[in-house]
Image (spheres, grey):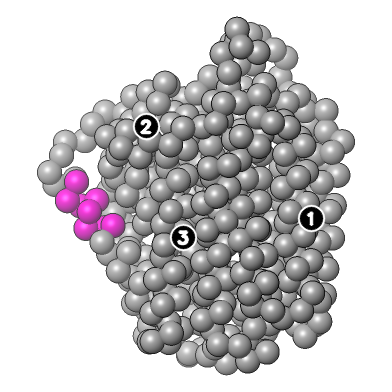
Amino acid sequence: MATLSNTKTDSDDHGAPPAPVIAIASVVMSMALIAVGNGLMFAYIPVRLGVEHFDPTWAGLIITGLSAGGLAGCILTGPLVRRVGHARAFMVLSALIALSNAAIGAGTYPLLWIAARALYGFAICGLFIVAQSWLNDAVANAIRGRVMAVFYVAYVAGLGVGYALLAAVDIASAQAPLIGIAFTAVSILPVGMTRLAQPPPPRAASVALGRAWRISPVGVAGMLAVGGLSMAIAGFAPIHATAKGYSQADVALLLSAMPVGTLILQIPLGWISDRTDRRYVLAGAAALATVAGLLAIGFDGGALMALVVIYVIWDGASESIYSLASAHAADRAGKDDMVALSSSLLFAWSLSGFIVPGIVTALSAVYGTQAFIYVAIVIATVFCLFVLWRVATTRAVPATETGSFAPMSAQAPLPVELAYAPEEQR
């Protein structure tokens, strides 16, 4: 994967034997199991609030709380891992997700749910930092891209399964939170029993947005754009569909279909981006997201299958910005810049993912739940124009070392390489 393939791990330097496949698979399996419960809870919360006749603004506030928790997780995970190590941090963060789901299952209390989802946002962001940095340390450069691609595909597939499960649960009961707790509990087992060696204690990864901007303005802008796009589309689509009167099964179908677009569109777009200036492909993905958003307005409230197709394309185009922007930024970073760059890109994604849902929630209170569509269109259009402006005003800078593209999802936070202590400090 381009974001990580340029960085050499300590195990590479010291000739340590490669990690066994079963040990690596334990981390991937754990995150896939967590994804099933996460997808179910993403779908369950807005539908349950709709059934209970709560104003859709509450669902928007819950998403904003989740994003705020993710921003905190971006900052605090490094110190947590340094204190207790990767395996214990993984289990602690998984326990926090289970606790969040338990709070949701206690009853429909929107204020409690905001706090619970903020806790979830903190934990899931932290889990991705822990899991990805752990895998990044364990695998050799030659296979890192393939391992991380499998990691992302497994998580996205788990989300799709979780979304689909909504159709099978009793929405008026606590079945969904209980299922989420069960999957989270089971997910701890593979990591708890893994023999995968833990990396040395890290220093906290540094955030340097100014430095990241100098390396790749388009990469940082892409993260700012996709953080808002992802939270707007994936977060508010079930809220809007519920408010429009679509059934529980309809919402489940819509959400479970959306990850398909992520996997289908990213592969051809990534293949093209490996063979040309990635900025052209980024502009094309943003333009496609704009067109799909306009179609979402035109078909809003119409035939379900037409909306499913539109949302599959819309979500896939938007999510593609994530992987393309991270690959473009990594292409232009030197080896010494990778830790600060990946941390800064994650921070930009998290910051936008926190601000945009708040804006959408405020606009929804005035203009209705369809406000997220207009916000997403504006974000995609502005980013497209920015990329085209950069193409027109700057020469294509040769990449420091072009990496190969791998599918990624904005629902799975960007890989962050925690900075490990120098050898003499270990």
Establish if 238 lies above or below 425.
Answer: below
Q: Are marks 3 and 2 in contact (CB under 8 Å)?
A: no
- Tag 1, which secondary structure? helix
Mark 3 or mark 2, which has the lower sequence index? 2
Q: Position of residue 161 (x, y in %)?
A: 71, 64
Q: Dot 3 lies on which element?
A: helix
Task: Give the x, y percent position of residue 304.
Answer: 54, 85
Residue 184: mark: 1
Position of residue 187 measured from the top left corner of the image (x, y, whole percent): 80, 49
Numbered label attached to residue 331: 2
Give the Cα separation between the discs numbered 2 and 1.
Answer: 35 Å
**Span of residues in magenta:** 383-390
**The one of 354 and 47 positioned closer to us in this rendering:** 354
**Which residue was labeled with disc 3?**
354
Q: Nearer the viewer, residue 73 or 34?
A: 73
**Is residue 107 found left or right of 131 in the rendered image?**
right
